[in-house]
Amino acid sequence: METLITENITASEKAQLKIKELISQAGINTDYFLRVSVVGGGCSGLSYKLDFDNELKPADQVFETGDVKLVTDIKSMLYLINTELDYSDGLNGKGFVFRNPNASRTCGCGESFAV
């Protein structure tokens, strides 16, 4: 029996609301999406990068979660498989949080990781 593996990137309800709020505050139209990427750097070796973009590249991977579109390049996708983007507004600080099952360790600030 075959097992179907779903590889995707999702955003929690809180993250979706914050993304829509930021798009509205920036005054950009709804053709924009959130580009999620992984770049070298940070105290653990790899860092997450978020940008608004409206141009798809040929090898981009597109994921729709709710009514928010998340896009990543194929190289970053290797690090982001099954990651959930969340938003925290608790006492420990505000900001986007990545729940990445592929990260073997993260730094204290949560902005960089290693696999």
Image (spheres, helix red, strand yellow):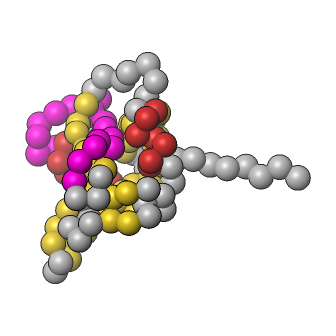
For this view, does 104 lie left or right of residue 37?
A: right
Q: Quadrant of the C terminus?
A: bottom left
Per the image, is 34 magenta? yes
Residue 69 appears anywhere in the view: no
Q: From the viewer's side, name the closer residue of 51 and 47.
A: 47
Stretch in magenta: 24-42
Q: Quadrant of residue 72?
A: top left
Between 102 and 5, the one nearer to me in the picture: 102
Residue 105, compared with residue 26, is above or below; it is below
Above/below status of 89 relative to 16: below
Q: Residue furthest bottom?
A: 91
Q: Position of residue 24 (x, y in %)?
A: 16, 43
Most extreme residue toward the right is 1
Q: In screen coordinates, is 38 left or right of 109?
A: right
Look at 33% across and 41% down and name the residue there: 37
Quadrant in the picture for residue 99: bottom left
- Residue 49, horizontal then vertical, whole percent: 25, 45
Location of residue 59 with respect to 70 vertically, above or below = above
Where is residue 82 drawn, in percent x and y? 51, 54
| Relative to 77, 93 lies left or right | left
Judge whether 107 appears above or below 17 on screen: below
- Residue 59: percent from left, percent from top: 46, 24
What residue sits 22% from the left and 39% below the top? Answer: 51
